[in-house]
Amino acid sequence: MARIEVTLGVDLGGTTTSIGFVDRRGRVMAETTLPTSPHQPAAKFFERLYIAAAALLKSTPGIELIGIGIGAPNANYFRGTIEAPPNLSWDHVDVIQEVGRFTEVPVSVTNDANAAALGEMLFGAAQGMRDFIVITLGTGLGSGIVVNGSLVYGAEGFAGELGHTIVEPDGRECGCGRRGCLETYASANGIRRTVHQLICDTLLPSELRRLPYESLTSRIIYEAASRGDRIALRAFEDVGRILGIKLADAVAHTQPEAIILFGGLAAAGDLILIPTRRSMEEHLLGVFRNKVKLLPSGLPDGNTAVLGAAALIWNDIERRNSEGVQVHASAGGRR
């Protein structure tokens, strides 16, 4: 019986790494997690990653691994590297070399937002689209921009950092070292900061007032908003207003068919979608109004990041096969 070809999707997070074998139709055949152990050397992590993947492969009969896709913070697709990632004690890691110690299948790496964009294009809400933007609303704000069917990487591989466009030049401090970046307002951490500011600056009644800042999470804020909490609802309105303004700017650059919200904060559904859509339409150039869809992710809950990483290598394998190029362990053409 013929084996089912699969790729391994790897979502490398600061605390936990998720992996899964994914077929061409986007079915996750098997998955597991392992602690990232961010203070260990990168070489040790990739050794543990190989051991976990090999065990998962052995326990899943009938599949054949043909490639590995890795979504990671500060990953560079062209160079096949992870460069000074936040929350990891790594400096500059040659991912292709590290993975190549254990396997010869092709490997591609990119940042997690770009992987999410490819996941939506192959398996999710962007199927059939050639021009769209994915916004990942997690701890920070990432973005993957697709134009004419291809991800926008830029000259050195770091294009598409909408989270680090400026909302307010003298605004909130950002982890990047600057002030007023979009992700300091529109992200899980951003909405926490907004709630804290509203508690300090307004007299609005709220159940959130009795919680210390360290205990606040975007989930708690969402649940409070669902119960009609006035500060929580105001926070979602404020975040949506700011996000909508910056999405209107992004539309002017690439005129996407759709913008797709992905990640933890996006799970708030209409609480974030409605104010963001309203603000985006208000600030769009007239020629673009009522033409750009704002959509939630179309990837199934639970393994969205793994699907995105797997889509990265599926996309590369199919592109290289269509161009008649033999596929080797590579990233952005590296061999």
Image (cartoon, rainbow, N blue to C red):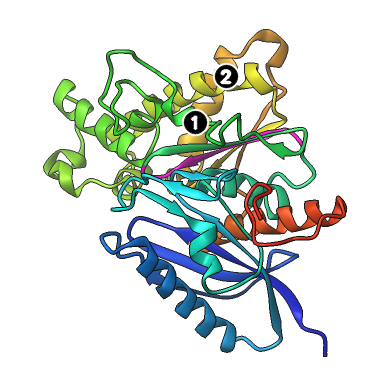
- Look at the image and say whether residue 318 sits in the magenta stretch: no
In the rendered image, the vertical position of residue 286 relative to residue 174, given as above or below: above
> Residue, x 34% and y 55% (percent of image)?
14
Q: Give the residue pinned by disc 2.
A: 248
Give the side of residue 247 with respect to residue 220, left or right: right
Q: Front-most of 254 and 189?
A: 254
What is the spatial separation of the Cα atoms under label 2 and label 1, in whole angstroms?
15 Å
Q: For the residue labelled by badge 2, is the local secondary structure a helix, a strand or a loop?
A: helix
> Residue, x 46% and y 26% (percent of image)?
243
User: What amino acid is labelled 2 in the image?
Assistant: Ala
Outermost residue on the top side: it is 286
In the rendered image, the vertical position of residue 25 relative to residue 130, given as above or below: below
In the rendered image, the vertical position of residue 257 relative to residue 126, given as above or below: above
- Look at the image and say whether residue 132 sits in the magenta stretch: yes
> Residue, x 63% and y 70% (percent of image)?
104
Q: Are marks 2 and 1 in contact (CB under 8 Å)?
A: no
Q: In the image, residue 249 lies at what x, y percent?
A: 56, 17
User: Which quadrant of the structure image shows residue 68?
Assistant: bottom right
> Residue, x 42% and y 64% (percent of image)?
17
User: Which quadrant of the structure image shows residue 96?
Assistant: bottom right
Q: Front-most of 119 and 110?
A: 110
- Dot label at residue 331: none
Give the side of residue 123 with respect to residue 59, left or right: right
Q: Front-most of 281 and 49?
A: 49
In the rendered image, the vertical position of residue 272 relative to residue 227, given as above or below: above
Q: For the residue labelled by badge 1, is the local secondary structure a helix, a strand or a loop?
A: loop
Magenta span of residues: 130-139
Predominant secondary structure, magenta span: strand
User: What amino acid is labelled 1 in the image?
Assistant: Glu
